[in-house]
Image (cartoon, rainbow, N blue to C red):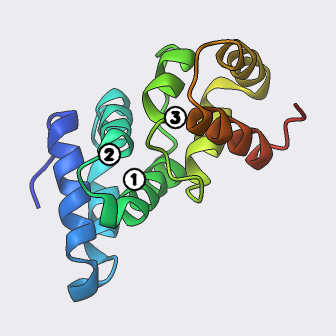
């Protein structure tokens, strides 16, 4: 395993860890989480977002995102990135069963900020799929529509 210096490095490490789950279980992802304690939060967050955005591994999308979400859950990295921009990037491809993503968003931005962003996004030209995913995020976070 190589120490991730960029978000692309981290994305590749997460995907490789998922590819090896059948051989070694979650050992590699646990090792990666230990290493990531020394990595800049912005690299971690961007790497996780890149995993969620990745549309090339549809057969492993849940495992990819679940393990990326596990990193968010265990390390709770912080960012000042605009919440609306982050949500715009992840909504299309986010797997609704990966609850770690909305909970990390809540922990990073706060529930009131997310309510405001959800309201803004609801008024934008989202696809039916994105609107459904937004609704699911609200459900996970117990936000009334």
Q: Which residue is mark 3?
A: 91
What's the CA distance linking mark 3 and mark 1? 15 Å
Which residue appears at 63% of the width and 12% of the height? 124
Q: Is residue 110 left or right of residue 126?
A: right
Q: Is residue 4 above or below residue 98?
A: above
Q: Is residue 99 above or below residue 49?
A: below
- Residue 116 appears at what percent x and percent y? 75, 15
Q: Is residue 60 above or below residue 54?
A: below
Front label number (3 vs 1): 3
Instruction: Specify the label residue 51 is tagged with.
Output: 2
Give the image quarter of residue 58: bottom left
Give the image quarter of residue 45: top left
Which residue appears at 64% of the width and 24% of the height? 109
- Residue 54 appears at what percent x and percent y? 29, 44
Crowdedness of circle 3 by 10 Å Cα count: few (<14), some, many (20+)?
many
Q: Nearer the viewer, residue 20 or 119?
A: 119
Instruction: Specify the label residue 68 is tagged with.
Output: 1
Which residue appears at 65% of the width and 44% of the height? 103
């Amino acid at each position: 395993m190589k120490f991730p210096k960029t978000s692309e490095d981290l994305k590749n490490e997460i995907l490789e860890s998922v590819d090896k789950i059948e051989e070694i279980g979650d050992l590699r992802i646990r090792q990666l989480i230990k290493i990531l304690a020394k990595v800049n939060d912005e690299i971690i967050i961007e790497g996780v977002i890149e995993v969620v955005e990745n549309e090339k591994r549809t057969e492993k999308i849940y495992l990819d995102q679940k393990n990326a979400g596990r990193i968010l859950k265990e390390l709770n990295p912080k960012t000042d990135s605009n919440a609306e921009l982050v949500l715009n990037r992840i909504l299309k491809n986010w797997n609704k069963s990966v609850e770690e993503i909305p909970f990390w968003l809540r922990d990073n931005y706060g529930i009131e900020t997310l309510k405001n962003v959800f309201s803004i996004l609801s008024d934008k030209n989202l696809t039916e799929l994105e609107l459904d995913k937004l609704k699911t995020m609200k459900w996970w976070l117990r936000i009334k529509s």
